[in-house]
Image (tube, coloured by chain):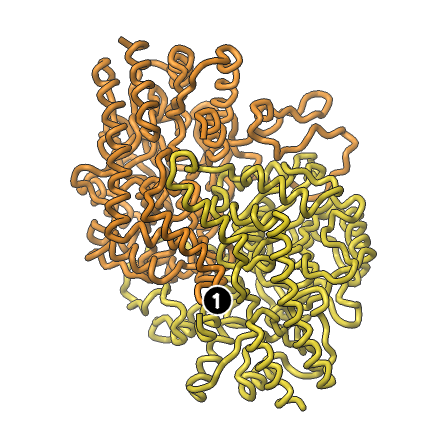
Chain colours: A yellow, B orange
Amino acid sequence: MSITHNLATSLSSSSSAFLAPPSFNSRGHVSLPVKSVGICKCVAAPEAETAYKTRVIRNPNMGKLQAGYLFPEIARRRSAHLLKYPDAKVISLGIGDTTEPIPEVITDAMSKRSHALSTFEGYSGYGAEQGEKPLRSAIASTFYSDLGIEEDDIFVSDGAKCDISRLQIVFGSNVKMAVQDPSYPAYVDSSVIMGQTGLYQKDVQKFANIEYMRCSPENGFFPDLSSISRADIIFFCSPNNPTGAAATREQLTQLVKFAKDNGSIVIHDSAYAMYISGDSPRSIFEIPGAKEVAMETSSFSKYAGFTGVRLGWTVIPKQLLFSDGFPVARDFNRIVCTCFNGASNISQAGGLACLSPEGLKAMRDVIGFYKENTNIIVETFDSLGFKVYGGKDAPYVWVHFPGRSSWDVFAEILEKTHVVTTPGSGFGPGGEGFVRVSAFGHRENILEACRRFKQLYK
Amino acid sequence: MSITHNLATSLSSSSSAFLAPPSFNSRGHVSLPVKSVGICKCVAAPEAETAYKTRVIRNPNMGKLQAGYLFPEIARRRSAHLLKYPDAKVISLGIGDTTEPIPEVITDAMSKRSHALSTFEGYSGYGAEQGEKPLRSAIASTFYSDLGIEEDDIFVSDGAKCDISRLQIVFGSNVKMAVQDPSYPAYVDSSVIMGQTGLYQKDVQKFANIEYMRCSPENGFFPDLSSISRADIIFFCSPNNPTGAAATREQLTQLVKFAKDNGSIVIHDSAYAMYISGDSPRSIFEIPGAKEVAMETSSFSKYAGFTGVRLGWTVIPKQLLFSDGFPVARDFNRIVCTCFNGASNISQAGGLACLSPEGLKAMRDVIGFYKENTNIIVETFDSLGFKVYGGKDAPYVWVHFPGRSSWDVFAEILEKTHVVTTPGSGFGPGGEGFVRVSAFGHRENILEACRRFKQLYK
């Protein structure tokens, strides 16, 4: 897969504003800013004013979504860049898309399961929507041993992003959400779609009725909880995307206490937990009392290169109850059974292989490789005198350019080095002044990108 | 996979009421009717009244869902049956779960793709959420050749059931839906979850604010559209689950005209289209003008035995517009990008193999096998003097027991023949007096079940 192609797919796989809302010009034609870059053809051709329209009213929540602020804008700028420099060897350290092959011990298992499906003995039809029992059991024992999480608390999914939306369906439109600022855009976008928010307020770059919990170097990337209003649901990603910060045990303990004091539910996104180097908790359930206020969503994507294979899980303890005492797990189970039919059985065979002793070792090797990449990037920016955050516990490096606009820095790096990064402000107003550099890449690309950074900022 | 196991998974894979709402007894304990059958452990243990509760209010739409009316009740009855007859050889012709192995030409492709993921050349990370281009192209040319549907109108999914819920998210809570009565329970359940309905009205066995379009032998299983109130969204499954009826060209033309007259959107579920024997349309887009009022959702599940592999697609023509002229495809694309990350790349490799000349032939052979099963079941009930519907264009046989309760017949068949069927009333009040017999099964089980039916009803 070429680097160019990587970028194209990475753009379309963003959870954030993929398709800009059309601007209707005076002739009633739809202008499609994204189409020009050739990555999105699934949109309508310009319609004449006389085109037949149904009487179905467009969901107003869809209209609230902001677009063009991150990935479509990156696409536009990249296209312009390639027009200007058609021979440029563009390197994408933008989206966090894995690049290294999946270890054979894992692909062998998927291959074997595929073949088995062509035999009478090995064929299986519908599986349990909650996931295959051996995989649920292996997830529980591998990641939650001694934490009181049981096999039947685990719901296997086709990825954390998909589960985030299923969780939003469970909660419905009458809840208020809090997110780290900056944070992974899927939390905010799915909240908007479910009608939990007000309109986007351009002046502050926030949606009304979402609590943005600022995470910055000043507070060690952990929000000042005393200044946060109560929310029903608190999305909390640790190690964090994009800042790379992993919450300490003390910080997570504070968060659990804050949730308990407010009667809130924490959705802990631990998709990068295996990247933790220090002794930060790998799971929120390491914190006493967390099972009464938290659930956890995670993924094989960044551990085993499963971004395309699609496999993740969500843990919802039996102890987590709505205000009327109804178990949250039970409504989630209902959604999983009604809106989903389980992850692919072949992917699940791969997941099970991931958790064998050989699979675990192989995953740790892959993670170790990306962590070496991270070190190279951190050292590069460090040597150039930048304040660099993240990297230690996550495959993302969060570089500070104080007083500068993220977009300006993004543009400067692209123009001068042909490297695509991600402007921090795309993750929320708290990301302004930062750029996220992803460590997912082949080694030679990481090294080459760093050579170019050194050239630019020497 | 044993027959017993088939039933267990079939129960949990139902989209309908899987988990009954708990009945809180006077001591505040949660009573779990499903747990006793051992298929659902992902529910809370009884909680003491003193258990910590969050202050998050349970989504009231979840509370509206009815449960216990179909699959949990079947599970309960089956368990009781096995207690009574521990040595019974139970045959499940209940849920429509495929039983025959996937043809090797298809599993070979999935196995090959799995292996390729362990190589630098063959590895791929995030794919386009809309699906891989070659597969979208092959779906367009295989199923929609000459119908004006293009590759970029196709959205590849992890199954029709999943896409139904994603479509409901697109439409939001302020639309009114119509469904065939009887129909596949996921349409109604997803509408309830999204808050489109009122409460369940026990007397008529319907949810308020859903239009139930009665389909019976009297109207040739096509609704009397002159008696139907306008709805925004019309779910229409043809060939139909559970009745097996395929709408004729004239009927679909009427439906498209009805939608156009009312400004409605038809969601045509064509998951069984390849089972059509006669000249009924395989796609709603065979009807002139359908692209302005309809979309279509379909699946590889019942063609290639992909119920566990998970692969389907939805077609949304560019011409389909909301009342403000905004293209429906564009909002669906946004949902697919925000709430989904594409089907597994391995499953997609299988889908592409399905659409090769060899794959198509292999799928037709599998379908032919199930159609032979269907003939055996139809002939059996026919020879016994029953009015039998369906079967010709679908893998479901819809047997009429006039004046009798579906549940009574279900119980009679289970008691006397140890065969599990599905009571028609589980698909809506219009299914009362019918039983659905699925043709998915190994030949020897179908023959044995039919021998027992002949014994019972001779």
- A300 sits to left or right of B302: right
The one of B36 and A58 positioned closer to us in this rendering = B36
Q: Position of residue A404 (x, y in %)?
A: 67, 83
Q: Position of residue A277 (x, y in %)?
A: 74, 62
Q: The residue tagged with tag 1: helix, strand or loop? A: loop
Q: Amino acid at mark 1?
A: Phe
Q: Residues within 10 Å of mark 1 (few under 14, many from 20)?
A: some
In the image, A299: left or right of A7?
A: right
A392 vs B274, nearest the viewer: A392
Can see residue B222? no
Q: Quadrant of the N terminus of chain A?
A: bottom left
Please tell me how many numbered marks the rendered image carries.
Answer: 1
Where is residue B29 drawn, in percent x and y?
A: 70, 25
Residue at label 1?
Answer: B120
Q: Position of residue A444 (x, y in %)?
A: 56, 77
Q: Is residue A403 left or right of residue B363?
A: right
Residue B255 sits in quarter: top left
Q: Quadrant of the C terminus of chain A?
A: bottom right
Q: Is residue A226 left or right of residue A154?
A: right
Q: Chain of mark 1?
A: B
* Residue at the image point whose x is 48% and y is 80% from the top: A78
Q: Nearer the viewer, residue B288 or A310?
A: A310
- The answer to whether residue A439 is above or below residue B164 is below
Query: In front here: A302 or A437?
Result: A302
What residue lies at 33% left-to-right and 21% top-to-bottom?
B434
Q: Can residue B180 be seen here?
A: yes
